[in-house]
Amino acid sequence: MEEKKETFTYTYSAKEQEEIKKIRDKYAPPAKEETPMEQLRRLDESATKGAAIVSLIVGIISALILGVGMCCTMLPGWERYFVPGIVIGVSGIIGIIAAYPIYTHMVKRKREKLAPEIMRLSDELMK
């Protein structure tokens, strides 16, 4: 009869184990509930995130509109577009100027909406 030899091989790599854990954590469902401090941080961040996105979009589009207006006024042979170019450029400038007030208005509204929950969580944490 043939004799079976059983062998055991074990290899351990700390870096490899950390990488496996990171990849696994991406796909695993959240194991714990969100703590009050994490909720507070998330709510505080959400007050400015949406407003920043909207104001950036308004500012970028307005800057592009300003650029189109400038092109209309500066290109040789486009003399008939000079006055419309000024109007287009001024509308772009107005949009750029409006981006910050849009941001502050949106943040103010969102903070008013989130204030009761923020106050409740902060009171809970300070006790």
Image (cartoon, helix red, strand yellow):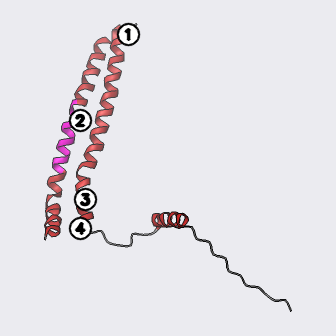
Magenta highlight: main SS:
helix
Which amino acid type is shown beneath numbered disc 4?
Answer: Pro
**Mark 4 or 1: the one toward you:** 4
Which amino acid type is shown beneath numbered disc 2?
Answer: Ala
Is residue 76 positioned above or below 86 on the image? Answer: above
- Which quarter shows the C terminus? bottom left
Between marks 4 and 1, how big is the CA–CA gap?
Answer: 61 Å
How packed is label 2: few (under 14 Cα within 10 Å), some, or many (20 or more)? Answer: many
What x and y, as percent, mark residue 25? 45, 66
Between marks 1 and 3, how big is the CA–CA gap?
Answer: 53 Å
**Mark 1 or 3: the one toward you:** 3
**Mark 2 or 1: the one toward you:** 2
Which numbered circle lies on residue 78?
A: 1
**Mark 2 or 4: the one toward you:** 4
Q: Is residue 70 magenta?
A: no
Query: Which residue is tagged 3?
Result: 41
**Viewer-proximal residue among 44 and 18:** 18
Q: Relative to 109, is 83 on the left or the right?
A: right
How packed is label 4: few (under 14 Cα within 10 Å), some, or many (20 or more)? Answer: some
Between marks 2 and 1, how big is the CA–CA gap?
Answer: 30 Å
What x and y, as percent, mark residue 49? 28, 49
Between marks 2 and 3, how big is the CA–CA gap?
Answer: 25 Å
